[in-house]
Image: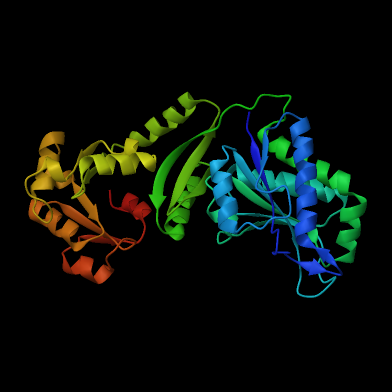
């Protein structure tokens, strides 16, 4: 059964927002524990980042979430406006408005609206650490404005209903304890250092009819699509993508074992049909031998081959082998140096390769 880790925002010397003697950290903890109790009573496995008044940095909270074994990360906060009683209502924050986390956020907001809160909506906040650095679907609930007398009155007088509304929103999304939740399988289609490139890739997938998410896997942004109840369904999607007929290989000056270990740690080894490492060839980049050996081993032709790299040596290697070359600007080299090396194409996102191949 899917489990959750609940995070009471702020804590210890970090009071969060304050108003008229009220501290956000206290409301956050009270609400977190109340929602957790309801979830536990319904059979949902629950863990916590904190259950007492202690300080944790946002990075520490994200780390605890990643190491918890939970399937969802839910952070509890209360909002604040520049001036007292300026705003009121609830909103839920997400890394990006995609996938099951966005569905959960909307379910929570809708339920809180029924309690009487104004529903401000679901907002993207890709720079918040607890949303950016968690590797599992994460949401951050802003349960009313701490410096709104109306929201505070509602928070106190309807606390049990609010706790139940949030718990119901969570269980509506992941399945209650009385109904076994099947596993969720996804297919990872890309890994990026730059968030904008990951967002572009996700948008392309959505345009093709897939639902997906961006998951931060320090220091990369992983683009994952599909939400399937069985592994077989996910495999079928993966095979569907492979039918596009593009074979991906790697030629590197790195050692074979080191590279394989890295690819497996990023869960992307399956996307590469062939790896040529430092010990697999006599001559390294920018010599053409790595490309030529790859083509011989895979029985590929020069005219149907494209070398993609982020360094001038990659481009020169491809040119020496007589194949097409493409430089990427989101690595270690700039556009000017890649063009000077002779790149046939320059792209700013790996997704742009679809326009070339």
Residue 168 appears in the figure: no
Q: Which residue corresponds to the image point at 79% horizontal and 49% vertical from the top-left?
A: 31
Q: Is residue 334 left or right of residue 24?
A: left
How far from the left and from the top, in percent, is residue 216? 49, 51
- The N terminus: image quadrant: top right
How has the structure been colored for display?
Answer: rainbow
Q: Kindly give the residue lying farthest to the bottom in the view shown.
A: 83
Horizontally, residue 267 falls left or right of residue 39, namely: left
Q: Does residue 284 appear in the picture of this structure?
A: yes
Question: Taking 157 as reference, is 285 left or right?
Answer: left
Instruction: Return the x and y of residue 42 as percentages of the image width and height.
Output: 76, 30
Who's the residue at 16% across and 65% down the image?
341
Residue 170 falls in image quadrant: top right
Residue 255 in the image, given as x and y percentages of width and height:
20, 45
Tell me the residue at 49%/41% (across/down). 225
58 w.r.t. 250: above or below: below
The answer to which of 244 and 102 lies nearer the viewer is 102
Looking at the picture, tell me which residue is in the foreground, 148 or 327.
148
Q: Determine whether 79 is above or below 285 in the image.
A: below
Q: Nearer the viewer, residue 22 or 324?
A: 22
**Label tally:** 0
> On the rendered structure, is 5 left or right of 185?
right
């Amino acid at each position: 059964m899917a489990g959750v880790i609940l995070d009471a925002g702020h804590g210890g010397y970090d009071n969060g927002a304050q108003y008229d003697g009220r501290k956000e950290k206290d409301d956050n903890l009270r609400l977190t524990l109340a929602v957790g109790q309801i979830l536990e009573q319904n059979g949902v496995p629950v863990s916590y980042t904190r259950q007492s008044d202690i300080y944790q940095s946002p990075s520490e909270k994200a780390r605890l979430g990643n190491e918890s074994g939970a399937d969802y990360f839910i952070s509890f906060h209360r909002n604040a406006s520049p001036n007292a009683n300026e705003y009121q209502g609830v909103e839920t924050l997400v890394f990006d408005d995609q996938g099951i986390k966005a569905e959960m956020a909307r379910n929570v907001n809708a339920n809180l609206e029924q309690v009487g809160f104004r529903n401000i909506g679901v907002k993207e906040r890709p720079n918040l650490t607890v949303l950016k650095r968690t590797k599992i679907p994460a949401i951050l609930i802003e349960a009313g404005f701490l410096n709104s007398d109306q929201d505070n009155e509602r928070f106190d007088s309807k606390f049990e209903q609010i706790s139940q509304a949030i718990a119901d929103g969570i269980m509506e999304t992941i399945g209650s304890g009385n109904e076994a939740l099947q596993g969720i399988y996804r297919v990872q289609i890309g890994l990026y250092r730059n968030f904008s490139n990951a967002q572009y890739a996700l948008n392309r997938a959505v345009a093709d009819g897939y639902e997906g998410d961006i998951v931060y896997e320090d220091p990369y942004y992983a683009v994952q699509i599909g939400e399937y109840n069985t592994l077989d369904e996910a495999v079928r999607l993966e095979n569907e993508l492979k039918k596009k007929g593009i074979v991906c290989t790697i030629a590197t000056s790195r050692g074979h074992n080191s590279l394989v270990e890295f690819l497996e740690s990023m869960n992307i080894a399956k996307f590469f049909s062939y790896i040529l490492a430092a010990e697999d060839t006599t001559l390294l980049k920018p010599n053409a031998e790595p490309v030529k050996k790859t083509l011989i081993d895979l029985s590929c032709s020069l005219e149907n081959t494209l070398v993609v790299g982020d360094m001038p040596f990659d481009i020169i290697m491809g040119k020496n082998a007589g194949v097409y070359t493409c430089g990427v600007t989101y690595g270690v080299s700039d556009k000017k140096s890649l063009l000077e090396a002779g790149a046939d194409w320059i792209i700013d996102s790996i997704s742009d390769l679809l326009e070339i191949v």
